[in-house]
Image (cartoon, rainbow, N blue to C red):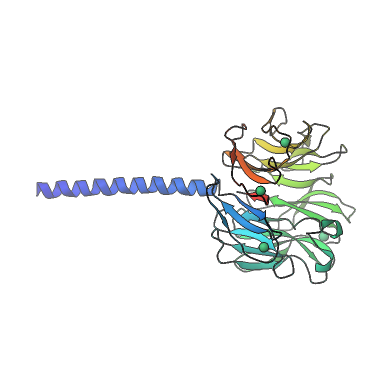
Amino acid sequence: MLINRKLKINYYFYFFLFTVISILIFSGCSTTAGTQKDPIYILNEDGNPEVYISSTDGESEKRLTNSDGNEYSPKWSPDGKSIAFISDRNEKLQLWVMDPKGENEQLLVDLIGEDEQSLVDLQNPEKSIIKKPPDFFWAPDSERISYVSFFNNQIDLRVIDLSTKTVLPVTKSPATEELGNWSPDGEWIVFTVKSGSNKLGIFKKNPLGVDEIELSNDIGSQPRWCPKGIKIAFISKRDGHEEIYTMDKNGENEENISTNDSVDNDFSWSPDGKRLTFISERDDNPEVYITTVDGLEKVRLTSNSASESNPVWSGDRILFLSDSDGDNDLYSMKPDGTDQLRITTTEGEESEPNW
Ligand SMILES: [Ca+2]
Ligand SMILES: [Ca+2]
Ligand SMILES: [Ca+2]
Ligand SMILES: [Ca+2]
């Protein structure tokens, strides 16, 4: 009896230990997946861009798409289960989604109408009405995507529900809007009205309600909520050149935080919303910098005569592009500029990194 009982206690103890260890390992993995995902990007090696994924250490990379068309703008869903991207493989710009292995590609929606396709040629932007791939942003719930549409010769913002494929108009006006991201609570979409209206500026709208609120009368670009939802950063040329501004989520306290006569742009929030990384040419050529959200403390993180671009802050690292060996490659570093790591080594052009 006693031996039996001892065995039983041992059994329960080891079962308990196994469960605890499993939970620790499992939750550790899912935490990582929720923050710093593997870098995805476009690689154009032979005139045919494709979506690629790399491990964070650069040791393994994999092509995810295989089409004759041009792919653009791969973006992770916040839950890390899907990658959305744009492709013109069907002779028109469309929004697609696939899983992280590059399988189960699914067409979501046309971004441009039949009549407008002939006006858009992203490979020759100087001849194109739209100069860059239409913006789109995952909702925090990973179930919806906001995007820019170009139909009936009109640029508007829309939201598609991924499970039902229902499309909801966010704006419907002759004005030209530029899309920003979702507020972290998923309630609001921030956007700018750049032309074609007597009310230009930065607005927020709740796509499921009726509220549309003006935040700024500046026709700033790239409005982005901070990950904690407290502030919105944007680029403004109100001083004649590009500067990074912040404002409170209600539009108050607009503040120039880059404060420099050179071009400052291309910013990305830190996950805690306390700092931003950005590109500045204040030291003669594009370099990666970080700044505190009040703009008071700035640190240059890179130092070379090459061009750095597209810094993306995720977890405790910054992913960025540099053409230091003649063509763009993907690198990452810590937010203090140390531990720089080269991720890709191709002779092709990497672009549009996301992680
Ligand atoms: Ca392709
Ligand atoms: Ca419009
Ligand atoms: Ca540089
Ligand atoms: Ca390269």
Where does the image place residue 282, in percent across and percent down from the top left?
A: 78, 32
Q: Percent x, y for residue 178? A: 78, 53
The residue lying toward the viewer, choosing from 306 and 100, is: 306
Which of 284 and 180 lies nearest the eye of the viewer?
284
Residue 303 in sight in this render = yes
At horizontal 62% and vertical 32% (from top left) the residue drawn is 337
Where, by quadrant of the figure, is residue 168 drawn? bottom right
Q: Nearer the viewer, residue 33 or 72?
A: 72
29 to 254, vertically: above or below = below
Is 29 situated left or right of 351 in this image? left
Horizontally, is 304 left or right of 175 in the view?
A: left
Q: Tell me: residue 333, above or below residue 223.
A: above
Residue 78 visible within the image: no
Outermost residue on the left side: it is: 1
Count of all numbered marks drawn on residues in the image: 0
**Horizontal arrangement in the rendering, residue 170 relative to residue 141 (left or right):** right
Q: Ligand 1 falls in which quarter?
A: bottom right
Picture coordinates of residue 295, whole percent (x, y): 73, 31
> 49 above or below 261?
below
Query: Residue reaching furthest top?
Result: 296
Name the spot of residue 36 as percent of width and height, x first: 55, 46
